[in-house]
Image (cartoon, rainbow, N blue to C red):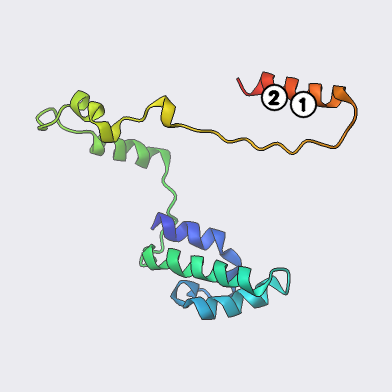
Amino acid sequence: MVLAEGIREAYSDLFAVNKNAHELNANDAKNKLRALYKGSKNDRIIGQIAKTFEALCSIADFSKKGKGKVTKIEKVEQTAEQKPSINSAQTDTERRETPSNRIGVESLQYHINIVLPESRDQAVYDAIFKSMKEHLR
């Protein structure tokens, strides 16, 4: 249901044209999207968007018409329901120590690409890197 709401939001223009857009196949969605984009995107891109839309719709649950947004109270109730009982076979510590649940810092990677302006003034580059040093700590 949450995925369905996300799809409705992301493809709101398509759902404005056809309220049952989730039932369209990729070719029909492509034709609708082509009309919506009015030449701003090429056919290949529109085809890929349509295929993505069809793939997302195939795994989403559109049967419920709820908003899909969870309120804070519902989140608290869900968390309380999801807590394991004391009598469970595996304790929290055992669950946390299993290799599949452990993520080491060494496995996290951040890739930052910076396109520097073309300049002969060294002060421009110094200011950029000084700002990065201050903000990326």
Snapshot quadrant of residue 86: top left
Label placed on residue 128:
1
Q: Quadrant of the N terminus?
A: bottom left
Q: Amino acid at mark 1?
A: Ile
51 over 101 or under it: above or below: below
Please state the horizontal and vertical placement of residue 15, each as a whole percent of the image. 55, 70
65 over 88 or under it: above or below: below
Cα–Cα gap, marks 1 and 2: 6 Å
137 over 89 or under it: above or below: above
Please state the horizontal and vertical placement of residue 97, each as a whole percent of the image. 24, 26
Please state the horizontal and vertical placement of residue 30, each as a whole percent of the image. 57, 76
Snapshot quadrant of residue 65: bottom left
Foreground residue among 63 and 45 = 45
Q: Amino acid at mark 2?
A: Met
Lateral position of residue 82 relative to residue 125, left or right: left
For the residue carrying disc 1, how many other residues have a C-alpha within 10 Å: few (<14), some (14-19), or many (20+)?
few
* Secondary structure of the residue carrying numbered label 2: helix
Q: Can you identify the residue that label 2 sits on?
A: 132
Q: Residue at x 41, y 38 (%)?
A: 72
Please state the horizontal and vertical placement of residue 40, each as a whole percent of the image. 73, 69
Label placed on residue 99:
none
Q: Quadrant of the C terminus?
A: top right
Q: Residue at x 15, y 32 (%)?
A: 85
